[in-house]
Image (tube, rainbow, N blue to C red):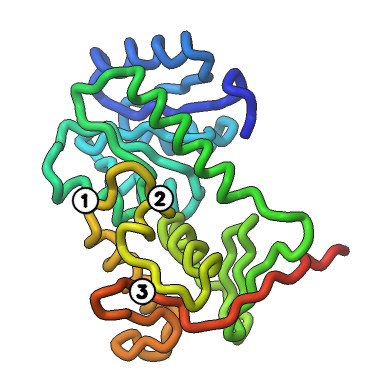
Amino acid sequence: MADQAEIRLLLVDDEASLREPLADYLARQGFVVEQATDAAKARAILAAEHKPDLVLLDIMMPGEDGLSLCRHLIEARQLPVIFLTARGEATDRIVGLEIGADDYVVKPFEPRELVARIRSVLRRTARQLHVPQEDALYEFEGWQLDPLKRRLVDPEGTVVPISSAEFRLLTAFLDHPRQVLDRDRLLDMVQGREAHLFDRAVDNQVSRLRRKMETDSRDPKLIQTVWGGGYRLAADVRRVAQETA
């Protein structure tokens, strides 16, 4: 991970009374902060500026809401996202986790807590992106996953798009093949903190992976349910070196 002085944040929130003081606080902590008042301005900044290391994103905004923008940030740009939201209900948190957000902070919040969350997400992202120089690719049952590019290829050679949340979940399975992983352990691996309160998020992400990877998602052969125990990747996994030109 880069030095903190080099960490770029994009703060997207239409509430100036929160956004501007928070941006000032984060800048004093050594972050480089770009501000956007809505999703349209955030998209314009992303098209014109350097890619941020992390996005702080409000859910309720005029025009395109934060959930829609979050899908774009994760699936198209593979950026880590922390939601800043006044919605404290469990359902809204579950939706955020299911989309693939890395964390959420409910307003009003303590800025020091947000900084700790930012650092935690960036550390976790750095660990996920760090792989050995050799044996970097995962191969299993004809499938291949490149963890650096987050690129999943099926046995026919077709690239299968996956979200950041799906990538993290699949990597957890690939790092523990043929092991039963319960929901709490999976959530600790892919989300961190107290996300174990929302184990439905794991079930939905598993279902999404199955729809993309199984011949019949109703009768899964690759990602199996272990009743009362969790899930298991029923495949042998090997790491193979990247081919160099």
Give the residue type at disc 3: Tyr
63, above or below 173, in the image: above
Q: Is mark 1 on a helix, strand or loop?
A: helix
The residue labelled by disc 2 is 72
- Which residue shows up at 47% across the image and 20% down it? 33
Residue situated in front as seen by the camera: 196 or 13:
196
The residue labelled by disc 1 is 197
* Spatial separation of the CA atoms under disc 3 and disc 1: 18 Å
Q: What element carries label 2?
A: helix
* Spatial separation of the CA atoms under disc 1 and disc 2: 26 Å
Indicate the quadrant containing the N terminus: top left, top right, bottom left or bottom right.
Answer: top right
Give the residue type at disc 2: His
State which quadrant residue 103 falls in: top left
**Relative to residue 38, is residue 32 drawn left or right?**
right
Image location of residue 35, percent across then percent down: 41, 22
Give the residue type at disc 1: Leu
- Which residue shows up at 45% across the image and 83% down it? 222
Mark identifier at residue 231: 3
Image location of residue 14, percent across then percent down: 26, 25
